[in-house]
Image: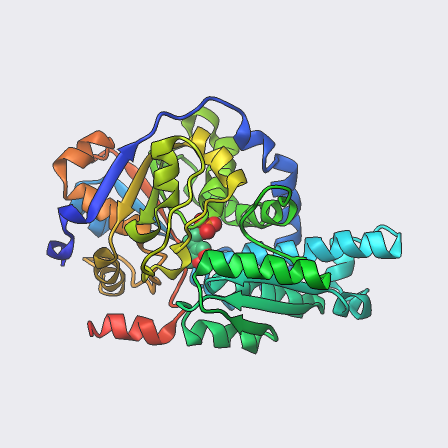
Amino acid sequence: MLKTFQFSDISHTPYQRHIGTASEEIITRDAFNAATTEITAWEGYKPTPLHSLESLAAELGIGDIFYKDEGPRFGLGSFKALGGAYAAGKVLQRELTKKLDIPVTLADIRNGRYASEAKEITLVSATDGNHGRSLAWGAQRFGATCKIYIHKGVSEGRAEAMRQLGANVIRIDGDYDASVHLARKEADQNGWFVVSDTSWEGYVDPPLDVMAGYGVMTNEITDQLKTPPTHIFLQGGVGGLAASVCSALRQHWGQDTPRVIIVEPNLAACLFESARKDTVTTVEINEETMMAGLSCGEPSPIGWKILREEASDFIQITDELVAPSMRLLANPIGDDPFIEGGESAVAGLAAVISIALNPKLKDLLGVNEKSKVLVIGSEGATDKALYEKIMANE
Ligand SMILES: Cc1ncc(COP(=O)(O)O)c(C=O)c1O
């Protein structure tokens, strides 16, 4: 099974981290705590599992591989359930407080106290699937109206999942970044509220709320692990997930926080390029990667501010590694558990396997039999049809 992982499918750049306090100041401890208090009060909240892939780790000569499986998250299939829905509640809270001129709480929003007022508010976002699903779910829960912009590469299965949650889904001809720009433009013209998982100049509150929401997952990890891992491999789209996780880990473990390695598809490696140029850098997407959640050409500037201080390595992988990694999770080695992981979920694991099979990279990254490696399985089979096709090896 491991033979299918090619050394040539990976490239690495080390990064000289900047010294600073971004991990404390951008998403504060208070922001993480507030998000955790709210989200853990939602109906259906349950921590997701953290699996130890002991047999795979032994085969690769690594101490431990931990896989945080976000597939079961709120029945929505990905960690994104935490971010968009929480940010939806926060936007409604801010807007209704302003409009009604009384302090509105998140519990008021959650309990439908201002449902008729919430219905008049339209929340919009661009998405490659998972963020939009979370926003649509949040808007439905809180009674707001929701419009979602998707690009030409988003599968019909993912679009339908958002329609099922009551969203009006608008498909455009361009790529992810074009859908972000259109959502912004139409929101400006119509008085709608953008709830984006990425930031831009003058627009930071909702993406900060989104990243604070992801902290629930990191909190669970630190509870489940007790002692810090040595390495964490974090997949990057706009960098929101990675930035949130490494801030929360730094806040929790301080100096003992793990070495942070960012993993992206080579077809959308904007964080890798940002590291090489040491400044936020946009890349053009000429071809869609099958890791749909990671197909982003523009980093989130607030995410980058954290990653430039926390990430030590940046890696690009090719799409060829994705299907073998998904099949490996579904047909595990030895006593490892069966895991249903989606295309974007396995990026970190694919990188770990490729590195473990490459003595030079293994040495460079300090991965050995003493290492405890953590990866985030950020989604389950969020596109069932594609998942089945991959399993059938078609
Ligand atoms: C399943 C999955 N994993 C990872 C990511 C990357 O998150 P970010 O764009 O915050 O870097 C996404 C983004 O949509 C995703 O859907």
The image quarter in which residue 314 lies: top left
Q: Is residue 27 above or below residue 102?
A: above
Which quadrant would the N terminus be assigned to in this image? bottom left
Q: Residue 10's spot in the image, x, y percent? A: 21, 45
Q: Is residue 200 above or below residue 182?
A: above
Q: Is residue 291 visible?
A: yes
Q: Residue 281's spot in the image, x, y percent? A: 42, 40
Depth check, front residue: 124 or 90: 124
Residue at 22 percent across and 56 percent down: it is 321
Which quadrant would the C terminus be assigned to in this image? bottom left
State left or right for residue 182 relative to residue 328: right
Q: Residue 294's spot in the image, x, y percent? A: 39, 54
Q: Quadrant of ligand 1?
A: bottom left
State left or right for residue 362 relative to residue 260: left
State left or right for residue 114 relative to residue 200: right
Q: Residue 361's spot in the image, x, y percent? A: 19, 36
Depth check, front residue: 115 or 35: 115
Q: Name the outermost residue toward the top.
A: 19
Q: Is residue 41 visible?
A: no
Q: How is the image coloured?
A: rainbow
Residue at 51 percent across and 61 percent down: it is 179
State left or right for residue 148 relative to residue 232: right
